[in-house]
Amino acid sequence: MKSTVSRQFYRLGLANTLWTLIIPALPTAFGAFLMRQYFLGVPKDFEEAAVIDGANQLQIFGRVYLPLVTPALAVLAMLVFNGAWNDFFRPLIFINDPYLFTIPLGLNDLKGYMATGSISVVLAGVTMSLIPVVIVYIFGQRYLIEGIMMGGVKG
C-alpha cells in the first residue's frame, strides 16, 4: 500500500521524477530554526534606518536583511545539498527507473546481486561521488568562514 505522500505525487504527475526528491527536501525544520536564529541576531537599527528612508517591508527584506543573511543561506544550502546528496531512503521509495537513480542507489546497484560485484568499481564510484560535494564546499567555503567570523566576539 502506498503512502499518502506518494499518492499525491502520482496525482500531480510527479511520480518517478527527480522533482519528487527536490520538492520535499527544500523546507526543513532545521532550516527554519537556523534562519530564525540568524535573523534574530541582525540589529533592529538597520530596519529602523530603512523605514526612515521610506522603504516598505519587501524592500527592507530584499535590500537590508537578505544581504546580511547571505552567509546563513549559503551554510543552509550546503547542508541541505549534502543531506539530499547522501539520501538513500527517499529515492528508494519514489524512484523506480534505474536511469533516475541517485548516487547512493547507483552505488548500491553497483554492488550487484548479493554483493557479487567488483569492490574496486564500487570504491571508484564512491570516489567520484565525492567530487560534487567537494566542489560545493570549495565555492561555499567563503560564506562558511564569513558566517563563523560574524558570529564571533569582536574585541
Image: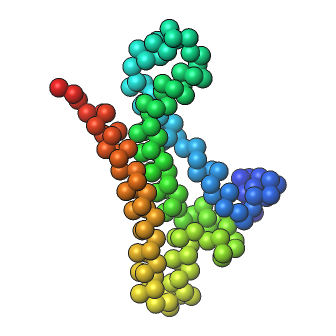
Is 111 above or below relative to 128? below
Q: Quadrant of the N terminus?
A: bottom right
> Which residue is pictured at 56% across the width and 15% down the height?
55
Residue 62 falls in which quadrant of the image? top right
Furthest toward the right, the residue is 11
Can you see residue 54?
Answer: yes
> Which residue is pictured at 46% across the width and 12% down the height?
48
Q: Find residue 43 and report its horizontal and vertical position in percent.
A: 39, 19
Which residue is more in the foreground, 119 or 124? 124
Q: Find residue 146 and report its horizontal and vertical position in percent.
A: 33, 40
Which residue is more in the foreground, 114 or 57? 57
Q: Find residue 39 and report its horizontal and vertical position in percent.
A: 45, 27
Which residue is more in the foreground, 63 or 105? 63
Which residue is more in the foreground, 45 or 15? 45
Is 127 above or below relative to 85? below
Q: Find residue 67 and report its horizontal and vertical position in percent.
A: 46, 32
Furthest toward the left, the residue is 155
